[in-house]
Each structure stands twice: as structure tokens, then as C-alpha cells.
Amino acid sequence: MDDLELYEQFKDLNLRFPKLSLEKDGDSLWSVRGDLRFSATFSGRQIDDLYSIKITIPKKYPDVLPEVQEASNRIPGDFHHYQDDSLCLGAPIAVRYKFKKDPTLAGFVCNCLIPYLYSFSYKIRFGRMPFGELSHGTLGILEYYGNLFDMKDRRRIVRMIQILAEDNYREHDRCPCGSGKRLHACHGKVLRELMTLQSPVEFNSEHNLIIRYLVKTAIQGPYSSLFRRGR
């Protein structure tokens, strides 16, 4: 995205959140900084709050999503952060789903960032998360895919992700979920939509992370057979 188009996106964002500014960092990356004041409601519980944030916009935006840091240190590091101290807004594919609804800076802030900030404010006030809470790290990614596919069997979830990792969707194959149906009549729609959100390389990275996690933790016994991929 060129600078002019990015600036147009920022103008729209700035109309909604006037305390934010667009700046260029020393490494030639654009960033959005400042106080983000929001009002959000879930199940009748409205929260008005303010956070100081920095949104770093990667050079390959919007194909690569921005990273967010919270500058006022209100949010502790054990609340859904990555190791580089950026905020974990959710499982990567979940964030892409939300961003796809409105692939702009304003869409990213409203659909991806504010729900995260609202969740933290909600938990501080009411002692629990408003939308439910996935585990941290790789297990959270696995749980998200399980919810997305409506499946609990981790072996079958891994085989679904393997289709995406290998770019090997064949609509007349049997669905790995065990229903006995062909893919196109079962989980095909979900898989086809996922294929528009990430590349096979990105799915492969998640697939390998999950395999290593399952082998390491041995949640359901040996997983070595999952490394033998059919071609």
C-alpha cells in the first residue's frame, strides 16, 4: 500500500479517534500512536475507557496485519501478549477473519483491537472475560480451530489444518472430521474461506507448531504418525 492510500485510511480512523496521530519511525515504518478512547457494550454492560497505544504498520500491510503495543503499561504481560510485548489480539486466523470484514485501519482498530481492550477492562471490573477465553500460545490456536470446525478430536483438527498447509483441498475426498461425507458437503465451505485468509506457508507454520506441541505434551498419546503426510 502506498503512503497516500495509508494516509486516507488514517484520516478515517482519526475522525473516529482524534487523539491518534500518524508518524514515521526511524526504520521507515509508519505507526499510529496516542490515546484511544472507546465506548463498547456487551450483554448490556457498557465500558468507556482509554488506553495509550502504538500500532506499527508493516510494509506489506494489509497482507501482513499491524502489531499493537500498549504504552501505558496498564495491561500486564501475562494477559495475552507475545514475547516481543505486542498484544495477542487472538488466534492469527481469527484476527484475519475480523479484519476481512473491513480491511482498513479503522476496521482493524474497531473489530480487532477494541474487543481486546474491552475484554481486559471487563475482566478487571467483573473478574471474568466477556467472550470466553482461549488458552495462551499454540494451545489457543488449536482450541480456536477446534471451535471453528466444531470438533474436539485433536487428531482430526490437525488433519483439517494439514489440508490447508499442503494446499490439498479436494472436494470429493472424505472429510477428515469423520462424518463420512465428502468435503464439499461437510467442512468444505469453512476450508475454502480459510484458504483466502492465509497462505499455505502460514498454515504449515501453525500445523508444525501444533504437532510439536502435541508431541511435547502427549495429550492423547503418541502423535508421531501425524508427521507422515499423504501426498
Image (tube, helix red, strand yellow):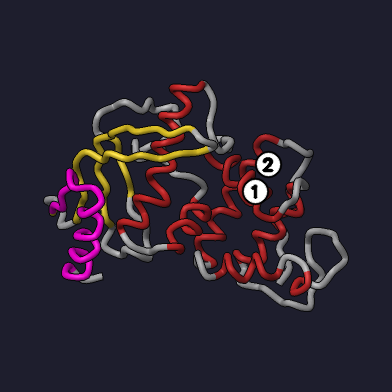
Residue 27 placement, left or right of 70: left
Q: Amino acid at mark 2?
A: Val
Q: Amino acid at mark 1?
A: Ile
Q: Quadrant of residue 37?
A: top left
Distance between mark 1 and mark 2 Cα atoms = 6 Å
Residue 166 visible at all: yes
Residue 177 placement, left or right of 78: right
Q: Position of residue 196 (x, y in %)?
A: 52, 70
Let me know if residue 17 is in the magenta part.
yes
Q: Position of residue 151 (x, y in %)?
A: 75, 50
Q: State which region is magenta.
A: 3-23
Residue 221 versus residue 125 in the image, above or below: below
Residue shown at 57% from the left, 65% from the top: 194
Residue annotated with mark 2? 215
Secondary structure beneath label 1: helix
**Quadrant showing the N terminus:** bottom left
Give residue 211's mark: 1
Residue 189 placement, left or right of 134: right
Residue shown at 69% from the left, 54% from the top: 158
Secondary structure beneath label 2: helix
Q: Are marks 1 and 2 in contact (CB under 8 Å)?
A: yes
